[in-house]
Image: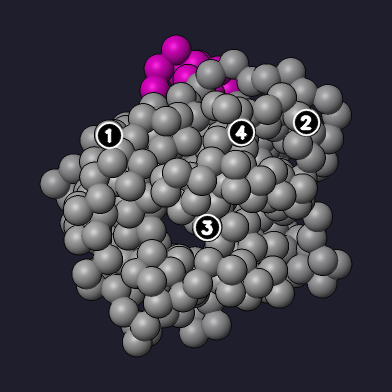
């Protein structure tokens, strides 16, 4: 892994501010090359990338590094360096970069939003919740803003915003902890900022599952009301298809077969949704079989993978 790309001046500021808002939980002691310890106690190394994908992401990282070197005190430079590191699987280094940025910009919600996301990736759920709650406080009463994509979709149209991402990831962190009431509350807040079809289906998917797990079937059914097959989805096709399955318009088996022929991220997303559908419909053995199959894959940063891991850890 590349050495930590944080300017000495930033490190000094971080040390001075270590007892303030930039403080982060003590890091785990991990073997060389490892990025996290799973919720089941397994060592997790950076997920594999296709050579052409790695080459392109390394090129973009070099650009972000150059921008950071030129303006290491600028929040945008820090954020993009952290994001480019994370896209290559350097999650701990990304967290360190955001932590240094928080020392310089303790009131910038974007830094807490991104660090919170990568705390989820590295299974540090309490730290994620702390960061994302802080982000909600910082953006309260402020106008929302579109969040630029680091990995643009085929139309080049960003589909999420700062506040939708904060509430979405906060809901996920609570969900993974098994705190379903707080997860539902966070996802309902996220719906207020889900102003396009892609964000609507992503939020609705997790809210629907959460409400079903809470036994609130009527409320869950209401979440499906605005969902239909004709929605103009740019990138969140897996969530859209799962919601159509919940409505009875697609069979679970056909959806699993469809996902298996796609990429690993889509497969983990769909497989967890189908497994969870079995679980809250009383078919625990079928559910846990699917969850175990998800963990045979390598895309451990995918939210469906993390959720399957959490299910098996609780079991």
| Of labels 2 and 1, the one closer to you | 1
Residue 169 appears in the picture as rendered: no
Q: Which residues are magenta?
A: 12-23
Mark 1 or mark 3: whose residue is earlier in sequence: 1
Residue drawn at 66 percent across, 46 percent down: 289
Marks 2 and 3 sit apart, C-alpha to C-alpha, by 26 Å
Q: Position of residue 160 (x, y in %)?
A: 37, 64
Q: Position of residue 66 (x, y in %)?
A: 67, 56
Residue drawn at 60 percent across, 42 percent down: 285
Pointers 4 and 3 in contact (CB under 8 A)? no
Residue position marked by numbered label 2 in the rendering? 43
Please determine whether, in this image, residue 27 is positioned above or below residue 191: above
Residue 204: image tag:
none
Residue position marked by numbered label 1 in the rendering? 181
Marks 4 and 3 sit apart, C-alpha to C-alpha, by 15 Å
Pointers 2 and 4 in contact (CB under 8 A)? no
**Front residue (pair 143, 185):** 185
Residue position marked by numbered label 3 in the rendering? 274
Marks 2 and 4 sit apart, C-alpha to C-alpha, by 16 Å
What secondary structure is found at the residue carrying circle 3? Answer: helix
* Number of numbered discs on residues: 4
């Amino acid at each position: 892994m590349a050495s930590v790309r944080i300017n000495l001046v930033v490190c000094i500021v971080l040390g001075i501010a270590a007892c303030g808002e930039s403080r982060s939980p003590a890091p785990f002691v991990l073997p060389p090359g490892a990025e996290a310890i799973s919720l089941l106690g397994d060592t997790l190394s950076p997920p594999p990338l296709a050579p052409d994908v790695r080459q392109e992401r390394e090129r973009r990282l070099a650009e972000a590094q150059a921008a950071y070197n030129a303006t290491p005190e600028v929040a945008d430079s820090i954020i993009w360096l952290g994001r480019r590191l994370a896209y290559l699987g350097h999650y701990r280094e990304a967290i360190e970069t955001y932590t240094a940025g928080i020392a310089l910009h303790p009131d910038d919600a974007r830094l807490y939003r991104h660090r919170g996301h990568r705390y989820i990736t590295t299974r540090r759920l309490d730290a994620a919740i702390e960061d994302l709650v802080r982000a909600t406080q910082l953006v309260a009463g402020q106008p929302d803003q579109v969040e630029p994509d680091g990995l643009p979709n085929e139309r080049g149209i960003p589909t999420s915003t700062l506040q939708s991402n904060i509430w979405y990831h906060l809901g996920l962190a609570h969900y993974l902890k098994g705190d379903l009431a707080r997860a539902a509350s966070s996802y309902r807040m996220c719906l207020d900022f889900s102003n396009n079809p892609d964000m609507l289906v992503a939020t609705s998917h997790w809210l629907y599952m959460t409400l079903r797990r809470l036994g609130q079937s009527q409320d869950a059914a209401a979440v499906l009301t605005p969902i239909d097959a004709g929605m103009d989805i740019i990138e969140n096709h897996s969530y859209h298809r799962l919601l159509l399955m919940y409505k009875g318009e697609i069979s679970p088996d056909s959806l699993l077969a469809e996902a298996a022929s796609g990429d690993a991220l889509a497969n983990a997303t769909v497989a967890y949704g189908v497994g969870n559908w079995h679980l809250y419909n009383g078919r625990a053995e079928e559910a846990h079989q699917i969850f175990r199959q998800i963990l045979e894959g390598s895309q451990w940063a995918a939210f469906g993978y993390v959720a399957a891991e959490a299910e098996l850890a609780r079991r």
